[in-house]
Image: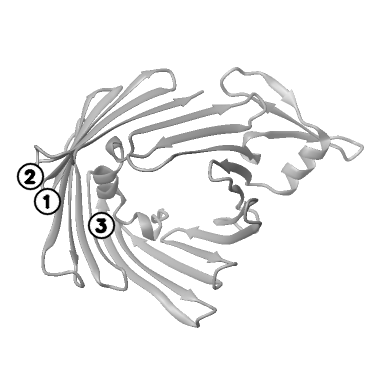
């Protein structure tokens, strides 16, 4: 049976993740705490200390319909349901009003976030509600200090062999970005376009193609209005070793081609190390280990191998807790 292809932004994801993900030197310190209450509400607290600039953070809560199970509708027409915690096995009942909301809007998830920049963000997600494969997102943000609002509407539609997305900013422009990916037997072809309604002009366009099969994947992309070209390759060598590389050429900046290579090695089931280096001699190393149930520590460093005697190096740490 045909599978659903990845979205346009993920055509080169295997190589991009290997080259960019889990390198902790980009911030001096990063903390994330995720917890799930017995009633299914998810809490997420994030804090980040940049090498330059103030400390930033956010607190968010998520309520999802998928976390509950409706048991029956009784004779009086009242909806009764129960939530069962998968970890503890404990079961609690719904309030009737909440149950009606959950039944009426399947695939519902509501996330509210408050950041240290005093921004109140809300995201409402509805999936498989109107038709199977369609997901809608409504995002709003409010800045109390400036009394300004923002609003976005995003649509995602995926079926076998096709994955499409539409991102709109209702308060700026309005603007819209549309992308689509077609897939068949490991081959992927995608395109992206942006449009500003206020200016009645196309703002951006991009193309991408890729192939993924088993332990390896390759992709070619043309972004920034077809001025920046990149080719990437990813290889899962074995269960312990991954390797990848990416070459990038900016046609507006000159004739030089940028090159990055990276590798990942699993030390054991609970830890791994990563390393990468680019054509400018910037090398990065990372170490990730699971300390216990739900706790993960990441350590990273970046070195300028061309200027080892200068203060251009960076170190960082990350701690994540899930409970």
- Number of the label disc, if any, that sits on residue 280: 1
| Residue drawn at 83 percent across, 36 percent down | 96
Query: Tag 1's secondary structure?
Result: loop
CA separation in Å, label 3 and label 1: 29 Å
| Closer to the eye: label 1 or 2 | 2
Residue 193, percent from left and from top: 41, 72
Q: Are marks 1 and 2 in contact (CB under 8 Å)?
A: yes
Q: Which residue is mark 3?
A: 211
Of 256 and 52, the residue lying toward us:
52
Q: In the figure, 199 relative to 311: above or below?
A: below
Q: Are marks 3 and 1 in contact (CB under 8 Å)?
A: no
For label 2, count other residues whose C-alpha is less than 10 Å away and answer few (under 14), some (14-19) or many (20+). Answer: few
Q: In the figure, 118 relative to 135: above or below?
A: above
Residue 214, percent from left and from top: 25, 45
CA separation in Å, label 3 and label 2: 35 Å
Left or right, residue 42 beside residue 50: right
| Residue drawn at 11 percent across, 64 percent down | 256
| Closer to the eye: label 3 or 2 | 2
Earlier sequence position, callout 3 versus callout 2: 3
């Amino acid at each position: 049976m045909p599978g659903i292809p990845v979205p346009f932004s993920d055509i080169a994801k295997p190589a991009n993740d290997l080259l960019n993900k889990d390198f902790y030197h980009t911030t001096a310190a990063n903390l994330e705490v995720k917890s799930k209450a017995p009633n299914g509400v998810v809490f997420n607290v994030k804090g980040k200390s940049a090498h330059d600039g103030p400390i930033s953070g956010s607190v968010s809560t998520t309520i999802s319909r998928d976390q509950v199970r409706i048991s029956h509708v009784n004779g009086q027409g009242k909806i009764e349901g129960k939530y069962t915690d998968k970890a503890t096995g404990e079961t609690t009942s719904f309030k009737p009003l909440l149950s009606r909301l959950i039944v009426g809007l399947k695939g519902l998830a509501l996330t509210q976030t408050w950041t240290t920049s005093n921004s109140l963000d809300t995201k409402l997600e509805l999936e498989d509600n109107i038709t199977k494969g369609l997901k809608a997102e409504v995002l709003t943000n409010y800045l109390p200090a400036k009394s300004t609002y923002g609003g976005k509407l995003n649509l995602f539609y995926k079926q076998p062999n096709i994955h499409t997305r539409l991102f709109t900013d209702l308060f700026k422009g309005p603007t819209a970005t549309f992308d689509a990916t077609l897939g068949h037997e490991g081959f992927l072809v995608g395109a992206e376009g942006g449009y500003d309604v206020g200016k009645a002009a196309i703002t951006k366009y991009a193309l991408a193609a890729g192939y993924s099969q088993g332990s390896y994947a390759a992709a070619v992309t043309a972004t920034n209005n077809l001025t920046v070209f990149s080719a990437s390759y990813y290889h899962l060598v074995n269960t312990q070793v991954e390797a990848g590389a990416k070459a990038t050429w900016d046609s507006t900046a000159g004739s030089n081609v940028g090159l990055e290579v990276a590798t990942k090695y699993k030390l054991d089931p609970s830890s791994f190390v990563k390393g990468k280096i680019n054509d400018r001699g910037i090398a990065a190393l990372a170490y990730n280990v699971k300390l216990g149930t739900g706790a993960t520590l990441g350590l990273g460093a970046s070195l300028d191998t061309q200027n080892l005697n200068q203060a251009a190096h960076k170190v960082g740490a990350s701690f994540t807790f899930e409970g």
